[in-house]
Amino acid sequence: MAKFWTTDMVNRVEDDCLRLSGLGLFGTLEACPIVQAKRDVRVMSIFAGTNEIMKGIAAKFMGM
């Protein structure tokens, strides 16, 4: 449950950073540190089981 929550929160924060940065075209280039972090964050939701699988495991654990 912690893995799902943290990766979901990191995705939301990273989306907000990219949206609020006002970088324009630079915000789409790999040279931008925010774009690099966004790419790394996407991998976190897949590593050690996708978030959708983690939701199913957590629901089963809680008896839902």
Image: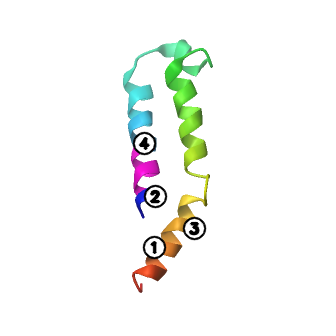
Bounds of the magenta segment = 4-10
Q: Position of residue 57 (x, y in %)?
A: 52, 74
| Nearer to me, 54 or 48 | 48
Amino acid type, callout 1: Ala
Q: Which residue is mark 2?
A: 4
CB within 8 Å, label 2 to label 3:
no
- Secondary element type, mark 2: helix
Q: Which residue is mark 3?
A: 53
Q: Position of residue 42 (x, y in %)?
A: 57, 42
Q: Position of residue 5 (x, y in %)?
A: 40, 56
Taking the spot 42% from the left edge, 64% from the top edge, the residue there is 1
Circle 1 residues within 10 Å: few <14, some 14–19, many ≥20: some
Q: Position of residue 32 (x, y in %)?
A: 54, 16
Q: Residue 58 shows which numbered tag?
A: 1
- Secondary element type, mark 4: helix
* Mark with earlier residue (2, 1): 2
Q: Which residue is mark 4?
A: 10
* Mark with earlier residue (4, 2): 2
